[in-house]
Amino acid sequence: MSDSGERRDAHFRDAQAIANLGSWERDLTDDRVYWSAELKRLLDVPRDTPLTDERFLERVHPSDRAVVEENWSTLGEDGGFDIEHRLVTDDSDTRWVRQRATVQRDEDGTPGTAVGVVQDITERKQYERELEEHRRRFRTLFEQFPQPTVEIEYQSDEPIVRQVNSAFEETFGYSAEEIIGESLDSYIVPQDRQQRAREINDRVQSTGRLVSEEVTRRTNSGERHFILQNAVYNGGSKALGVYTDITDRREREIQLQKAQNVANLGYWSMDFRSGEVYWSEQICDIWGFADGTRSIDEDTYMEYVHPDDRDAVAKQWQAAKEGEPYDIEHRIVTDGGETKWVRANADFEFDNAGNPVSAIGIVQEITERKQRESRLETQAEAMEVSMEGIALLDETGEFIYMNQAHADVFGYDPEDLLGRTWRCLYDEAEIARFENTVFPEIEDAGKWRGEAVGQTRHETRVHHELTLSRLDDGKLICTNKDITERKQREWDLRRFRRAIEASAHSIYITDCNGTIEYVNPAFERTTGYSAEEAVGRTPAILRSEANDEELYEEMWDTILRGDTWHGELINTTKQGDRYVVNKTIAPVTDDSDETTHFVSVNKDVTEMRKQQDELYRLRQAIDKAHIPLTMTDPAKDDNPMVYINEAFTDLTGYSEAELLGENCRLLQGPDSDPETVADLRAAIDNEEQTTVELRNYRKDGTMFWSQVTVTPVYDTDGDLVRWLGTQRDITERKEREQHLQVLERVLRHNIRNDIHVIRGFAEAIQDATSGTIATHAESIRTKSDQLVDTANKQRMITEVLLERPVQDTFEINDLLQRVTQSVAEDYPDATIHVHCPDDITVVASSRIGQAVEELLVNAIQHNDTASPVVKTTVSRDDEHVSLEIADNGPAIPDMEQQVGTRGEKVDPLYHGSGLGLWLVYWIVTRSDGTVVFEENDPSGNRVKIELPRSR
């Protein structure tokens, strides 16, 4: 063999090593086999170890062994084979190889020698798997993509449908069978939009992309939808169209590509000393060289490199000649003008001086991969810049991809969320909803669409619309968009609607011509017209003759100017009843500030007007009342008077102007009791109602006694807003009380002492004489005792009249038992019966026991039988307790029964000698009770006292 041939063989072996290419040669006549060193290396067999068929088959993967054996066994019959199978090394490393064999025959056609090549294609198989995964993912994404998607091919500028996804079928109402092969525009473009559609198609074909365009399309049912079309033109003939509902207005560009198998792997070698270059047949195919062209020099090679890549290739080649690695991807232009992408790498050998001696390399066409990468980059770019959020989650729920729009919804950057679970974006309740409801639905249907509430980085709530679709490998593709503002608008509208519906005011909305379009429930209640009766009519149905026509003209002039009108009207209900409304009419404008509607809010003030009239009448009554009244304002300094009536000015002698703004202490003077003033002040400080009697002074300096009552007045919130004061002139009463006090002292001391002296002399005369004189002395003594008793009762009556009435709560049975026991001890011959249920309580004067005792003693003392009998019976109803005392003695004279019934004056004909019944009358009266005298059956008296029952 010549030196040139040996070098070529050596180069061939080197190229095989670079290309992971082993070979074998089998003599079919004697079954001898030659195994190349590179093949042993591929099989992980030491170079010096003999290789046999059995040893080779041991390296073949068990699942592929039968196929390899079958092809070997039929090699002579079939003339060759080309199979791919796996090899397993001692380290259990599995690698893919492509084994090809051809049979060389003798002149008579007898198989002589078989030559085989084994090439390591592990990287290619891995790439093919990745490619297949991309294809499958593309198909899955295309089919399960939540937005309607269509693939078209332009034929004579007409967009012919090649495939559509299920979302397209669902949205437009056309099945794939109906529309595939047909013109897309003829199905979904309305007639009046055909010209616009042609312009869009022209732009797509000329520019390659329609980024965002609002268009009108129709569905199979004839409905017209505004949608946003994104289209990508591919290769000059095909395009993908993605349709998004215009309400979403989310821009999205879909780049879905089909990957293809990377093939045509070739090798080359170069001798820098001789300038000889060798190209394999595969490289010639890539370059498109004519048959037999196998060699090309460096300069010619550079002519085939794309002009835009020549500088980069030249720099890389020069660097490789200086010892740097050579691995570059670039474009070439074939003789036919076709542009291809290739990946070239090489290994250089250098002499001792560092000069390159030779180089061997591999060239692989990667045009389809580059095209796919370009499309994927375009798709990725479209996804990244899409206004709609897109994310991909793995089987565990962690984010493995996310565009910026998706992260923006939650206030993050994508890098913050990649590798984290979706649960970090939701609270416990929402997580539970997804796990219990959403994911089971995805498991059944493959996808889910709805609304969710997430949490932003700052823990604020964000409402978003979400679409989840499960891929075949278990991953989830997720699209979302922030609808927080939309939800807020919906909530605001719902709250506004609820406010109108719940409003107590009558509200209606009209168009610009005054035709009613809406009424709230309060309108129906107020006017008597139902919504069905009112809508479509005008507010004129409510007019009454009480309003002037000028009022309506002024109202319309105001609102047609765009201003708000406010005023009062008298309206008429459906039943003909009039009512007064406080009306506000405001125009409603659109985005261009044009009035579209009027809203009228009508507050029914009929009752308020009645109340105002009533308050006016009440004010008049208070102003003219005979009782002096004042109102003070505690919110102002020194609690000044803010209202006085005429009776107050008449009482005090001051004018209204002199009193307003002053404190009531203006009326106090030197003889005003400080303790009483202090008690009054304390009650005011404690917000307590109180009544005191106080010396006050008029403007002219004259003193008068005043019964002062102050009462706190509160508003509906319970806050003190006023003090109501009354002042009654009780000067005459105080003078009568002074007279009574003088009389009481006279009765207590003067008369009683004088009578005791008279009685003493009478007893002395009785003891010293007999006969008529002694009898007269006895009469004097008896009358003296009666006068003392009368004086005592008169004194008790005076005490009752002088003291302030005090009422307490009494358990009536206990009271009767205590009083009857005391009376029974003084009158042992009398019989007293008490019939009283337990737990009966009354509200009465603290002296009520004294009144009962007086009636019992009176019944016994005036009884003319040897054994007086008195019966006390108690009964009750819802409001009162009745105490009845009955005896069997002589009837009480009619004149005595007239106590309390003869007015304030007792005429000269009244000869009632018993003051005891008067004492009973005044005690019962101060208990807010009544006394009634009746005859008992068959004889005697019944005295009935009725007292208020305690609650």
Image (cartoon, helix red, strand yellow):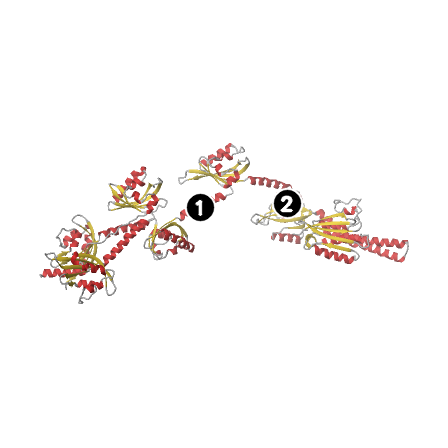
Query: Residue 416 versus residue 736: which sits nearer the camera?
Result: 416
- Residue 464 image position (x, y, % from top left): 39, 50
Say which element carries label 1.
helix
Circle 1: residue type: Asp
- Residue 253 image position (x, y, % from top left): 30, 48
Question: Could you tell me which residue is drawn at 77 percent across and 55 percent down?
Answer: 831
Say which element carries label 2.
strand
Which label belongs to residue 482? Answer: none
* Left or right: 498 as drawn, with respect to 119: right
Quarter placement of the N terminus: bottom left
Mark 1: few/some/many CA within 10 Å (<14, 14-19, 20+): few
- Chain-order first, disc 1 or disc 2: 1
Report the residue that reaches farthest toward the left.
2
Report the residue that reaches farthest toward the bottom.
48
Q: Which quadrant holds residue 54?
A: bottom left
Mark 2, residue position: 629
- Residue 488 image position (x, y, % from top left): 42, 47
Mark 1, residue position: 492
- Residue 710 image position (x, y, % from top left): 63, 49
Circle 2: residue type: Leu
* Left or right: 333 as drawn, with respect to 201: left
How far apart are the two marked residues, 1 and 2, measured between alpha carbons?
Answer: 52 Å
Question: Could you tell me which residue is drawn at 54 percent across and 33 percent down?
Answer: 546
Q: Let me know if residue 776 appears in the view.
A: yes
Task: Check whether the beta carbons of the residues at disc 1 and disc 2 lie within 8 A of each other.
Answer: no
**Disc 1 versus disc 2: nearer the observer:** 1
